[in-house]
Amino acid sequence: MGSSPSSAPSTDQVPRRTVPLASTTAAVPRPVFVPSTDVTLPLAFLIAGLASLMLAIGLLGLHPESLVQYHYHQVTIALVHLVVLGFLMSVVMGATYQLVPVVLECQLYSPRLARWHLPIHLISVAGMVVSFWTWDMKNLGHFASGLVFGALLFVWNLGRTLHRSRRTNAVSVGIGFSLLWLLAVLGMGIAITAAKSTYELVDQPGLNPLLLWPLARLQQLGAWVATFDAMAVMHAHAHLGILGVFVSITMAVAYRLVPMFLVSEVQHPRRALASLLCVHAGVPLIVLTIATKSPWKPLAALPIAVGFALYAWELAAILAARRRLVIDWALRAFLVSQASLAPAFLLGLALSWPGVQLTEFTGGLEGVYGTLAILAIPALAILGMLHKILPFLVWYGAYSRHLGTARTPAVHEMYSPFALFVCIGAFLVGLGLLCIARLQGSLLTAQFGVGTLAVSMLALTLNCVLVLRHLVSPVLRPIEPLPSRAPAPTPTPARS
Amino acid sequence: MSVNATSAPTPYRPLMESVVIKVDARGLEPPQPLVLILEALGRLPSGGELHARTDRRPLHLYPLLEQRGFRSETTEAPDHGFITVIRSQH
């Protein structure tokens, strides 16, 4: 692309009899951003994320009792972190590395940092899950520090990219805030671990000051966190992660992906921005009130309620204005996940109401709330969008260079729609069964639920294999020459 | 001379007149606009131009055009979407 930026279409060519495509065109600088055709890094994050989810479902099959007991249990916490950090975080990070430069039309600040981030993230998550499982708080702290280091690379890389792009819209603002909450939730996780650790090295004489200083500060931090109620701090940590990072980043990205796949536009950019700002304004309020066991929790949730309402309004407007009528199962899954925000919010509101005591029933409701917050909202959203993003990444990596010289398969031909249907359908049924099992405390229902989720994972695996095989053996056919005067296939938008 | 992407380019053209192929890729889910534009580009005669209309700035198209020796200019359409004019660098 050798043309100069900001130049309008050249007219210094030879005479033409063409009708201009647009009578007046506002010249905009041609973007200097060129997306990379190398999709290896986001693919690696995505595949690692999917493997984590499958491992988590497999381990749930071995320990279904973790679904019916109260959630403050080492196996439950280990599995939750495997899903949240191994699946959700890995996929979000991989997708962000790919999506943010495209959304912001700006090169990623440092692809090299992103490549370093991948092994640091994966090793740290694996170590953390094992440490939770064995309740080894000291090693948990070590691996969590590795995770924080990787996240710092991620936030620095994305932060510099956001700064470079200088674009302010709902997507960039939403992602920017989510990066801040990501650092906050990881810092909070380290602080909680510090509160549960012992510091025998601090009292050892002759300890290197370089090691003594951070250890002493960590000990002080842990002592301060220990003054709070342990469960309240853990719940605040969970809300900061799910709401501040995953829900908000999903909302921001939805404003880009939903219009793109449904051929629509954000109808009111200010409404979209306001929805995200409300949620982000509510995050610190809700985290503080939960951590301090304040009776003002329902009031603190008010900005979040407004943000969710504005989000639903804008999504409905985007859907109403869509030019593609058919909504496939991948997008349906995403929309169902976003609709789940409403029952999850109401349940959270009821559980946070002043005077509600922890009983067997409310404990069960807490379990349902957690299941919705982790599996129904971010996990289902990601499962749906993965069926869009993964095939596109593989298609772009395997076929983009062949376009125009050979016939390539369409993206939707790369996977089985039936397997997608089974994946989403079984996931929803499994989710429902897990909620019932949590309410009833029924191990049998939990086992059925995990079995159904396993069916969903099998269907997901099948589709992943079908998609990824195109990287190994691309399916290329020769382009048939167009018959003279015969009409070629034309794009047929569903609605003009 | 203007030809539609939906018909084959005319083999004969008067001297000093360039061929313009128009592709309307609006209303398509990604990556179909990319496919449509690059397939039409394969039928573009030397010295011709391709005008592609898309709903969004075709960011993934640029590296592929560069690899194939084309240059492009994208302008925002006043009504909706973008117009990308593609021509050979040679």
Image: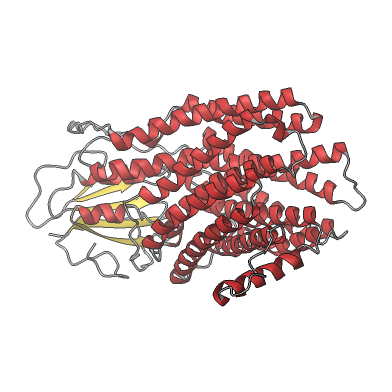
Q: Percent position (x, y) of residue A466?
A: 39, 30
Outermost residue on the left side: it is B15
Q: Is residue A465 above or below residue A156?
A: above
Q: Percent position (x, y) of residue A15?
A: 16, 60
Q: Is residue A299 left or right of residue A430?
A: right
Residue beneath the point at 37% across and 60% down? A111
Q: Is residue A315 above or below residue A412?
A: below
Q: Is residue A418 above or below residue B34?
A: above
Outermost residue on the bottom side: it is A209
Q: Percent position (x, y) of residue A399?
A: 29, 41
Residue beneath the point at 76% across and 59% down? A286
Q: Nearer the viewer, residue B62 or B81?
A: B62
Q: State the quadrant of the N terminus of chain A.
A: bottom left
Q: Is residue A201 above or below residue A317?
A: below
Residue beneath the point at 78% across and 48% down? A348
Residue beneath the point at 75% across and 66% down? A223
Q: How many marks?
A: 0
Q: Nearer the viewer, residue A19 or A167?
A: A167
Can residue A258 be seen here?
A: yes
Q: Is residue A154 left or right of residue B67?
A: right
Q: Nearer the viewer, residue A23 or A59?
A: A59
Q: Is residue A363 left or right of residue A53?
A: right
Can residue B80 be seen here?
A: no
Q: Nearer the viewer, residue A257 or A428?
A: A428
Outermost residue on the front side: it is A205
Question: How does the figure colour the protein chain or chains?
Answer: secondary structure
